[in-house]
Amino acid sequence: MNLKHALGALGAAGMLVGLLVAVSPPEAAAATTICEKYGSTSIQGGRYIVQNNEWGDDAGQCISVGDTGFRITSGHHDVPTNGAPAGYPSIYAGCHYGNCSANSGLPLQVSRMGAVSSSVSYSTADGYWNAAYDLWFDPNPNQSGQNTGAELMIWGNHQGPPQPIGSRVGTANLAGATWDVWYGNIGWNVISYVRQQTTNSLNINVTEFTNDAVRRGHVQSSWYLTSVQFGFEPWRGGPGLAVNSFSFSASGGSPTTTTTTPGTGGPGGCRATHRITNSWSGGFTAEATITNTGSSPAQNWRAGWTVPSGVSVTNGWNATFAQSGTQVTAAAPGWSTTLNPGQSVTVGYQATGNSSGSFGGFTLNGAACA
């Protein structure tokens, strides 16, 4: 749990220059060692920032930073497992307490998130810890201090008794795996996805997890993704935990237009259902399920339908939404562009207006649905 994240002075780089023997291969550049509690440094020309961030303990912690990641080299923590961790040594893209990496594409408004992805590989060690992404969302795109919107954690691995903030509220099938979903609030929303089958590498679609958090009401589409971090929260131990590689890329879309090409490959037929999942005075959420009942795939699929007059779609998930008058279009997301014969897709959206009117006229790539 990344609670304070105060930024301190940059750790001094200790460069050890050795003599080269003719028969030996060239040595790699020596690593940078950071022992300051909040020390940080940039790597890969500023593309990423690595931070020591020992915010929850005073035992002392050092990390060795190379060009692809970092390793915890000292700092044997032993803090109570029913409380906060000793820190969050991590690597990140974006802006954190005003310390920004270069050319990350962040901050990025949730409603404009296009293809946002990250991958990481890491090594584990003895002790009690988690290995987790930490995604931060804020109503203000240029937050210089602690984020006030939401924190989304993705636990790829963990060891020992520590648990996420809050309580378990369900499960989710994301990134080809099943995750236990936890939720709590400690002054901001904390939603945690804990992988049921632990792993030492992750390749995630950040937009997919964000959309799930939006659907659950814990992240707002008007907020901004400000940083994507990966690291370790140690309660006991620490040395040996290491990030071996990390990558991040982001692109923005549009809340009213889609960047995908028009749907092709007429399915020949489709079936559609629509249901209101929640409603309140002045708004509602809903889901539409579209099934390709034809004999050919629907490439770059587009589902369309009409909504009652006065209904305005504000955000959605599992598709890119656009609206013109009473006509709504849900276009395929970048990670799932083909709807094969017999396959269904469920898309959800939030809207303002009255949910009691008529929803109909469903189509899939121009073919009318039953």
Image (cartoon, helix red, strand yellow):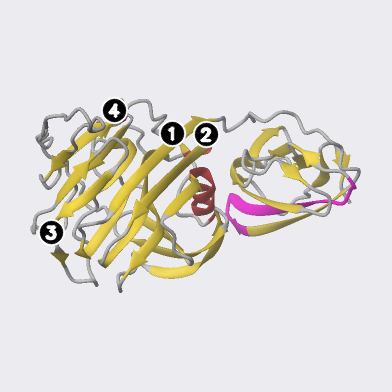
Give the label, 1 or 4, closer to the camera. 4
Q: Residues within 10 Å of mark 1 (few under 14, many from 20)?
A: many
Whichever of callouts 3 and 1 sits on the residue coming sooner in the sequence is 3
Q: CA distance from mark 3 to mark 2?
A: 38 Å
Identified by mark 2, the residue type is Arg
Whichever of callouts 4 and 2 sits on the residue coming sooner in the sequence is 4
* Residue position marked by numbered label 2 in the rendering: 112
Identified by mark 4, the residue type is Gly
Q: CA distance from mark 4 to mark 2?
A: 25 Å
The dot on residue 57 is 3
Percent x, y of residue 194? 43, 63
* Residue position marked by numbered label 4 in the rendering: 46
Q: Residues within 10 Å of mark 2 (few under 14, many from 20)?
A: many
Whichever of callouts 4 and 3 sits on the residue coming sooner in the sequence is 4
Q: Secondary structure at mark 2?
A: helix
Q: Secondary structure at mark 1?
A: strand
* Residue position marked by numbered label 1 in the rendering: 108
Q: Secondary structure at mark 3?
A: loop
Magenta region: which residues? 278-295
Residue 293 inside the magenta-drawn segment: yes
Looking at the picture, does residue 153 appear above or below residue 116? below
- Depth order, front residue of 324/365: 365
